[in-house]
Image (cartoon, helix red, strand yellow):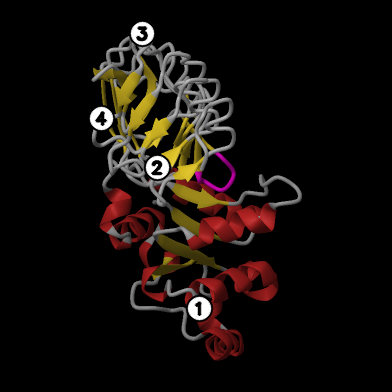
Amino acid sequence: MHLFISHKNTERDAALTRELVSFLEERGVFCWVDFNNLRLGDWREQIERARRTASAYIFVVSEDLLLGAEECTKELRNILEGGGKDRLIPFFADDYYFTHPEISDKYNYELGPIAAKQGVKLSSLGKTEAFERIYLYLPPELKENKESLSGFEFGADMSALVSYTGNSESVTVMGVRAIGDRAFLGCETLQKIKVCDGVQSIGKHAFRDCPRLVFAEGGGGLTECSATVIEKNSSAVRLTDGVYCFLTAAIGCEGEPTELKIPEGVRVIASGAFRDCFSLRRVTLPESVVSIGASAFDGCINLSEINLSEKVCIGKSAFADTLIKY
């Protein structure tokens, strides 16, 4: 869950937008805004993805934008046509929209009124009160995360948590679809991690070398995870029926079993989780499993029985060098 902010990248508008972002992020709101930092080549795709997945929108309306920002106008049109009208907060950085009816009439004709009921006028309120009013208008789910965003680094389109350099003991990951490789690697203060259901994948070594991590919860939306996400002897990993599990992912097994019963509640067989388990002959999956990662059973040369269902997504080489045909 994140807030999408559209503005004109002039010096004045960008400065005001940065102040707004700082105000909101101090209150735990995930903001996506382009300050000309997008990678060359896929910037349109990044903007489109961030817009489509946003929980709410702020459109910074100014003279500079109204007189020459085709991309911003296109973004506004896409927001309105995509059903985001009720979640749009126009932020009027100046009064140009109201003092030039030829401009407002043009926008109203092409896009419909943008001076909505919950629009915020900087000139009427002052900066601090305007920012507070915007925060008040945000949907509740954007304000549920009360933790500071200090220490978090996100990908360009806000869909992935790239790294965490903070020192909190408890962290909630929300508003992103992925936790990247090594995101929390070496985080010595981390004791508790909560992964909200919107997170779909967790990368390699994401929680390795976190010596104080003892509690992990969530992961109800996982579809992909690496077996190297965390050490199997970590206190945050549970051992059930000989299977090591982290959140809702099975990441390995104890010893050299001939049969494995994956615990109920596991959604993902992590990539490489049971690679080269030579003695393994039979695997029983619960109904909760939705995906089997790449190379999950690669090299299990004696594996001949597994109860696969049509709903399970199977990764590349998941059953390479086994007796399983699917």
Q: Are marks 2 and 4 in contact (CB under 8 Å)?
A: no
Mark 4 vs 1, N-terminal side = 1
Residue type pointed to by label 3:
Gly
Note whether 218 is above or below 139 in the view shown. Answer: above
From this viewpoint, which residue is outermost toward the right?
Answer: 41
The circle drawn on residue 81 is: 1
The circle drawn on residue 214 is: none
Q: Secondary structure at mark 2?
A: loop
Q: Quadrant of residue 189?
A: top left
Note whether 211 is above or below 230 in the view shown. Answer: above
Per the image, the residue denoted by label 3 is 255
Residue 157 within the segment the image draws in magenta: yes
Mark 1 to mark 3 CA distance (whole Å): 56 Å
Mark 3 to mark 2 CA distance (whole Å): 24 Å
Q: Main secondary structure of the magenta part?
A: loop
Q: Quadrant of residue 259?
A: top left
Mark 4 to mark 3 CA distance (whole Å): 17 Å
In the image: residue 63, left or right of residue 55: right
Note whether 188 is above or below 151 in the view shown. Answer: above
- 10 Å neighbourhood of mark 2: few (<14), some, or many (≥20)? some
Residue type pointed to by label 1:
Glu
The circle drawn on residue 263 is: 4
Residue pictured at 36% horizontal, 74% vertical = 86
Per the image, the residue denoted by label 2 is 308
Residue 136 within the segment the image draws in magenta: no
Q: Are marks 1 and 3 in contact (CB under 8 Å)?
A: no
Query: Which percent across, then down, holds residue 299?
Result: 55, 20
Closer to the camera, 29 or 231? 231
Closer to the camera, 69 or 10? 69
Residue pictured at 55% horizontal, 52% vertical = 33
Q: Which region is colored magenta?
A: 155-159
